[in-house]
Image (cartoon, rainbow, N blue to C red):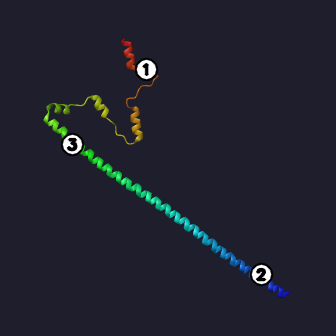
Amino acid sequence: MSRLTAFALVALCFLAALLIAINLHQGQKHKAELLQIELTASEQDKAQQAALLEQLYKVSSDNDMAQADLRSSIESVNTALLKNKHAMEQLKNESKEVRDWADARLPADVIRLRQRPEIANGAAYRDWLSQRDSLPPASEPNPNKWRAESSD
C-alpha cells in the first residue's frame, strides 16, 4: 500500500504542478489580453487627442484669420475717419457758415443723449438703461396730463 500511496502522492504532485502551470499560463494569457486592451485604449485615446488637437489648431487658425480681418477693418475705418476729419477741416476752412455751425454748441437734448455714466459691467449697464427716461407706473397719474386737463 505504501507503493500505491507513493504513486498517488506523486500523481497528486504532478497534477498540482500541471494545474499551477496551466494557471500561470492562463494568467499570462490574461495579462497579455489586458495589455492588448490597454494598448488599444491608449491608441484610441491618442487618436482622440490627435483629433482634438487638430480641431483646436483649426479653431486657433480661424481665430487668427478673424483677428487679421478685424485689424484690417479697423485700419480701413480709421482711414475713412481720418479722410472725413480732413474733409470737415477743409470745409471749415473754406466756408464761414460751416465753421460757425461746427463751432456752435449742441442743443441741450443732444448733450443729454450723449451723457453716460461710467459703466463697469453688464448689470450696471442694464440698471442704467432701466432708470433712463423711465415712465411712471400706470397707477400714478401723469402730472402733465392733469395740467392739460385742468387748463381746459
Nearer to me, 78 or 44: 44
* Secondary structure at numbered mark 3: helix
The residue carrying mark 2 is: 12
Say what amino acid the circle numbered 1 marks.
Pro
Say what amino acid the circle numbered 2 marks.
Leu
Q: Which tag is nearer the camera, tag 3 or tag 1? A: 3
Name the quadrant containing residue 151: top left
Quarter of the image with the C terminus in it: top left
Within 10 angstroms of label 1, few (less than 14), some, or many (20 or more) residues? few
Q: In the figure, is residue 87 to the left or right of 112? A: left
Which of the two discs, 3 and 1, labels the residue nearer the N terminus? 3
Q: In the figure, is residue 9 to the left or right of 74? A: right
* Secondary structure at numbered mark 2: helix
The residue carrying mark 3 is: 83
Which of the two discs, 1 and 2, labels the residue nearer the N terminus? 2
Which of the two discs, 2 and 3, labels the residue nearer the N terminus? 2
Say what amino acid the circle numbered 3 marks.
Lys
Q: Give the image location of residue 58, x and y in percent.
A: 41, 56
Proximity of marks 3 and 1: CB atoms separated by less than 8 Å = no
Name the quadrant containing residue 41: bottom right
* Secondary structure at numbered mark 1: loop
Label disc, if present, on residue 141 of the rendered structure: 1
How many numbered tags mark residues here?
Answer: 3
What whole-number distance in Å separates the C-alpha atoms at marks 2 and 3? 104 Å
What whole-number distance in Å separates the C-alpha atoms at marks 3 and 1? 52 Å
What whole-number distance in Å separates the C-alpha atoms at marks 1 and 2? 108 Å
Nearer to me, 40 or 102: 40
Q: Is residue 41 above or below residue 16?
A: above
Nearer to me, 104 or 23: 23
